[in-house]
Image (tube, rainbow, N blue to C red):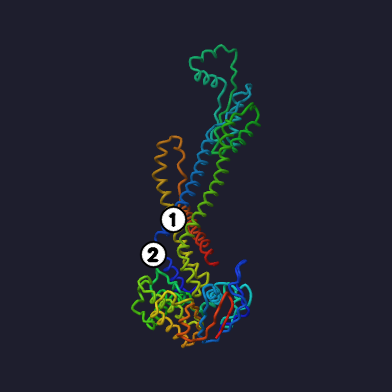
Amino acid sequence: MMAHIAWRHVRRAAVNLWRAPLPSLVSVLTIGLALFLGASFAVGVLSARKLLQGWGAEPSITVYLDRAVTGEEAKALADRIVSAEHAQSVRYVDQAQAMQRLKTELGDLGGALDGLPENPLPPSLEVVPAGSPGPAEVRALAGRLGQMSHVVDVDYGREWLDRIEALGRAMRNFGSGALALVLAAALLVVANTIRLAVYARRDEIEIMKLVGATNAYVRTPFLLEGMLQGLAGAILAVLGLEIVQRVVIPRAAAAFSFAAGAAAPHLLAAHFGILLGAGAVVGLLGSYLAVARFLRA
Amino acid sequence: MIQLFHVTKSYADDPPVLADVSLHVEKGEFVWLTGPSGAGKTTLLRLLFCAEAPTSGQILVGGRNVNRLSQGGVPYLRRNIGVVFQDFKLLENRTVAENVGFALEVLGASDTHIRNRSLRRLDQLGLRTKADSLPARLSGGEQQRVAIARALVNEPALLLADEPTGNLDASLTDSILELLFDANARGTTVVVATHDRTLLSRYRRRTVSLDRGKVVSDA
């Protein structure tokens, strides 16, 4: 396309936006809102999953040992776990320490334990896994620890992990489904909003075609306008997300202690780039669909 | 310039709007297309500028068979046809000069060329001083002259006018028709649809009469 025609299209698109600001504004706001909701939803799901992962990583694994095991054997086992499983720490709790802990926990009732003929508590190793493993990794690690010699039982808060895992799965499924739904609804709303704006200019399309404009020529300014509206909407969405990130979330974190660890994943320039791109694509696609209806006539 | 061979146009189960119409218009002719409302005048014009396709029959415009024209070929045919409507069909948010230049814009002409040609055409029609006004500020007669200027600005071989004076009083009607005769005198083939029989008696030209989709007379 010759440069002066391209420039004419850009100029025309800008003038059209300027001359009919209301329909443009409605499209911009619709796209902005749709992107804001979609992005907030995605960020919400991501941060909730991160929070769950954080919770899942906390429990340490308690490895109960055979009561006949000697202190040396237990320490050798601890060293093996550190080297083989790269555990962050392994602490040996012998029978006497275990009894002492129980006594402390029972408080005044602790004296009752003195009457026992022998110490029934097994020695144990308290293993803190390295990094922040997910529930599946904790389960696999516990399984491997259970296979080791002198190990009688392994406790890793199985039920707790199972629940977190199920919750994470449900959130992922629900999150993906709901996000797809939100985006599809947003695209429909955007396409309809743009269609209304294009409908108001159907005479212009008719006259352009009447004087011999090709479909591509008719379509181009509308696509440019759609793209500009999409970009403007995306900028609005970015501003909205920034406000939520900088103002709303810190306040929420202060108000609800459980959310303290749930700081939203920080939005990077790349994320904003994706949003701007999404805005431009939604605007282009919405305009294309809207104009296509009138080009067929 | 125009050849219709047994052209029929019908919609669904309704009686045909045009039934077995055959017609030849030579290059440089001026033809009145007349008949009562619903006779098929507008439909015939719409077939000529490819706003609709015939149900059956063949149509040749400027030697090109419009039935065989691809979707992409229609705009190029239209660039050789100027069309004028009763309701002017001007873009309200563009100035008079921009409206006239619109037909040149789609041809890819430069801004300067468009402006110069539009102004020259407006000058010929006595509208030079209104070039930068919006259409809403013009009278009906002036708006129709702008529409004619737009239709003629790229010197099409064929000019189609559908009731171009339908909204105008007698004195304005005469001035509009003068423009059409003038274009015809400069070589443009002109077909004007009208139901106003007084025009036909005042300006005697070849007259094709339609009634219920059929050509009832051609004289």
Q: For the residue marked with disc 1, what is the amino acid? A: Gly
Indicate left or right for A59 with A272 as reference. Answer: right
In percent of the image, x 49 and y 43: which residue is there? A47
On the rendered image, what quadrant is the C terminus of chain A found in? bottom right
Real-space Cα separation, disc 1 to disc 2, in angstroms = 19 Å
SS class, disc 1:
helix
Residue A19 is marked as 2
| x, y percent for residue A179 | 53, 48
Seen from the viewer's position, the closer of residues B217 and B85 is B217
| x, y percent for residue A156 | 58, 31
Asked if one can make out residue B107 in the rendered structure from this viewpoint, the answer is: no
Q: Is residue A193 above or below residue A162?
A: below
Image quadrant where residue A172 sits: top right
Residue B2 is marked as none
Residue A233 is marked as 1
In percent of the image, x 52 and y 21: which residue is there? A101
In percent of the image, x 54 and y 29: which residue is there? A91
Q: For the residue marked with disc 2, what is the amino acid? A: Arg
Indicate left or right for A251 with B197 as reference. Answer: left
